[in-house]
Image (cartoon, helix red, strand yellow):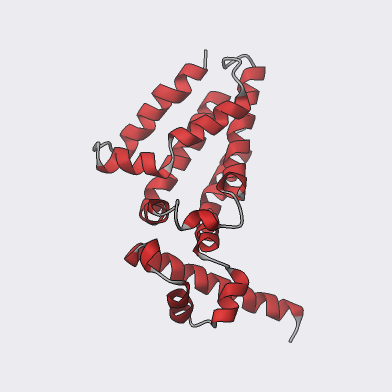
Amino acid sequence: MSDRTLRRDDDKISASILQTTESLFSKYGVENVSMHQIAKTAKVGQGTMYRRYANKGDLCMDLMKENFQDLQDSVRQYLENAGSIPVKERLFAVFKKQLYFLERHSRLFETIQSFSTSTCENAKTNFYEAPPYVFMHTVIRSLLEEAISAEAARPVNADFTAHTLMASMNTKVYIFLKKEKGYTTDEIVDNFNRTFLEPLFF
């Protein structure tokens, strides 16, 4: 069997594991799903399972990466075609994409984050070092730096501000605003822009 065939088979197995995990997590909750249950449902051996994922924390991280790819592709495509648009509008558009992404995947992320302290923080990669977080932070920091250089925004610390902007609209906050406070997604987007982004610009 060729290396290419082996890689293709490995990719299929990993995809099956992640699809099964997402389905089980969403249906039963992270805390109620075991690694054994995931392997059995995905029809893979225990050894195969643990060679890829040491624990549910690793599965949580890969699930978020997998779902994040759509957002990352959308942001990249937008920025590639939006060079002539004012940086303020580009920054607003990026956060709007992020918030609507949270809306589309809120059920899965709510399930994962509900048990993050005990279950999903055992991942090999720290959340803040994971590619999805690093990508979004880099995009936001770069747009802020561009705005500051053009004297369109206040001279804030772009790195720090990017971190705090991302922290202000994480999944838990978003779900709380939707479920407990009754805000619509459009209202959250509008209030986020007026409260956090508008004051940064002249």
145 relative to 198 in the view: left or right: right
Visible residue check, residue 81? no
Seen at 64% across and 24% down, the residue is 145
38 vs 79: above or below: below
Q: Residue at x 57, y 48 (%)?
A: 132
Give above or below for 87 relative to 6.
above
**27 and 29: which is toward the camera:** 29
x%, y% of residue 105?
A: 40, 53
Q: Residue furthest right?
A: 2
Quarter assignment of residue 50:
bottom right
Q: Which quarter of the figure is the N terminus placed in?
A: bottom right
Apparent side of residue 51 relative to residue 189 in the rendered image (left or right): right
Which residue occupies the extreme bottom position in the image? 1
Vertically, is 31 above or below 159? Answer: below
3 with respect to 32 (left or right): right
Instruction: Name the residue rendered at 61%, 25% in the picture.
Output: 158
Image location (x, y in percent) of residue 44: 53, 81
Q: Position of residue 190 (x, y in %)?
A: 36, 29
Which residue is nearer to you in this view: 10 or 78? 10
Q: Is residue 130 visible?
A: yes
Number of numbered tags placed on the structure image: 0
Q: Residue furthest front?
A: 118
Q: What residue lies at 62% left-to-right and 14% top-to-bottom?
A: 151
